[in-house]
Amino acid sequence: MARPKYFIFDRRTAGGVRKYQDAVKISLIVLLGLSVGLHLLVLFRSSLMDGGAGGGSMGCPDVVQQSAVFISGPRSKPAPSASSWSSSSDHNSQVERGSAGGRRPVAADGRLPAAGADQQPAAAAAAGQAHISAAADALPLDDAVGKAGKRKDYKALWRYYRLTANVSDSPYARPRQPLPPHKNMADVYKSNGSQFGNTVWDRFHAGITPYQLYQDPAVVDAVLKDVQTAAITKAEMKDGGTQLKLFIEFEGPGKALFKPLRLNNTQEDNPNHFYFNYFERHYSEIAAYHLDRVLGFRRAPPVTGRMVNLITDVRNRADDNLRDTFYISPAGNICLTGACKYYCDTSHGLCGSPENLPGSFSAFLPEDDGPSLRMTWRHPWRRSYSRLKLAPWEMDNTYCLLIKTIEPYDAGRRMLDIMDMAILDYIANNLDRHHYETFYEFGNESSPIHLDHGRSFNKWKTDDPSILTPLTQCCLIRRSTLKRLLDLTRGPKLSHLLDESMRSDPLYPVLNQEHLDAVDRRVHGALDAIETCLRNAKNPSDIIIQEDLKSWKL
């Protein structure tokens, strides 16, 4: 039967097969040429955009700058080079180059573009360009800008702060529900037919309010003094948890959670480890408490350092389960392993020198039952705690719109408290925020308690912008919090205030200078994120929330 003529290639003959093969080869060559051409076009466009950012008329589109706010997951960062870890300004601390048009390129690692450069005169920006570029790889962000004589003054943010002095129309400016009838924990106990005594611990617990754990620093200082000096009468292991922690009881009513030294403040976590594999650090708890206090939140329980004797203070006061984990190391030091999910074996033993071991002691809040019962909440921006999965907020830039429809984040103070917590965690470099607690009797119009900061202050070379995702996705900030951050750019630096606050701790110095420098750098990072939110805002009062303070008065 004859082959129809509309078949171009007759593969039944040798000539037809050759024609078919030639056509396939030509098609592959054309596809390869198109692919190479597209790659060259992308590279050529990138070079044009870089040239425009350096001083030409072309810059990154505004939409690209705005989308950088949401690039926050661990997979959004390029792999660092082998030499970048030795630099004091690693792969994700770059200084942007201001353009004559006022636009700036997005940093290569997805960090928020630094704000304030568009407020500098074009001539001054061009004059300092070469110096900033040369210094960017060796200096943290704020130091590099300072060396060039261009420390940010945040004039735009100060202007927005002054413009938002009136009470905002936002639902977050007023309570969503009636306020609780109790102005402090003493009222809660009184309404339940009980009362506090007159010890320093009772005064501390009685003074807890719906918005802060303490108002009088002298009361907290008295509690810390008692933790530092009171005799230890009992030590037992805390159930659960990934690492060893001990419940400690003192002579009198005092109790605390003890976290022993495992790493000192000069040791950074391995960059190849996930955040959920980081070691908990005793000094991190101390520094985070003082940071919370200096920022004015006062929502973290008091923490102090103390040197303990593993024989007289712990082993002799321990039960059999804990006592059986003690041993003497080959170096002749007293050690213990305890029992926990991870890191509780002889290869991760906690050893004294030879029997003295420093650690942090977090003062207990009132017992978690009865009038002082606490509620546990899953953090809306909790991480996945998996090496294979991403959390929903890491895959959806509009995730905050969903959270705003869920109580208690749809109105009232809770959402602004989450923003405060994000700023605290960002400055402390704490990625381990999975849950938080509130007091049940204070209701939903109360602030969360800032607990568990053992994995903070673990790195000083890197800043993780994903910690600020609640802020960058929702674009909300309490006006008083913004004012506190702005004050830290004009008055004494946060590093100085934090170091002075920690000076009274028995384990001072708590943080090394590198950690303190990182704290100052991250203040600018938080302000840059806020400025990015305000860049295209129609109404600044929808972002900077001035609360109706009268409606919050108990």
Image: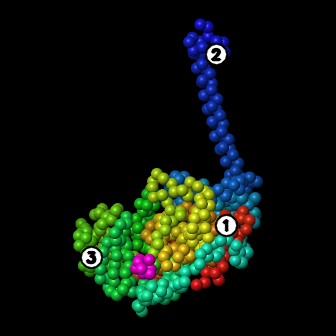
Viewer-nearest of labels 3 and 2? 2
* Mark number displayed over residue 7: 2
SS state under label 3: loop
Query: Residue placed at 35% from the left, 62% from the top?
Result: 342
Q: Amino acid at mark 3?
A: Ala
SS state under label 2: loop
The span picked out in magenta is: 364-373
Q: Quick one: which residue is furthest to the top in this view?
A: 1
Measure how far apart labels 2 and 1 are at the Cα level.
Answer: 65 Å
Query: Residue placed at 40% from the left, 65% from the top?
Result: 279
Query: Residue placed at 60% from the left, 24% from the top?
Result: 25
Residue 344 is left or right of residue 94, and the answer is left
Location of mark 3 (residue): 318
Per the image, is 9 magenta?
no
Callout 2: few (<14), some (14-19), or many (20+) C-alpha neighbours within 10 Å? few
Residue 295 is left or right of residue 199, and the answer is right
**Labels 3 and 1: the sequence-earlier one:** 3
* Mark number displayed over residue 108: none
Identify which residue, 164 or 497, lies in the foreground. 164
Q: Position of residue 7 (x, y in %)?
A: 64, 16
* Residue 521 shows in this picture: no
Query: Quadrant of the rendered structure where residue 422 is?
Result: bottom right
Decide: marks 3, 1 in contact (CB < 8 A)?
A: no
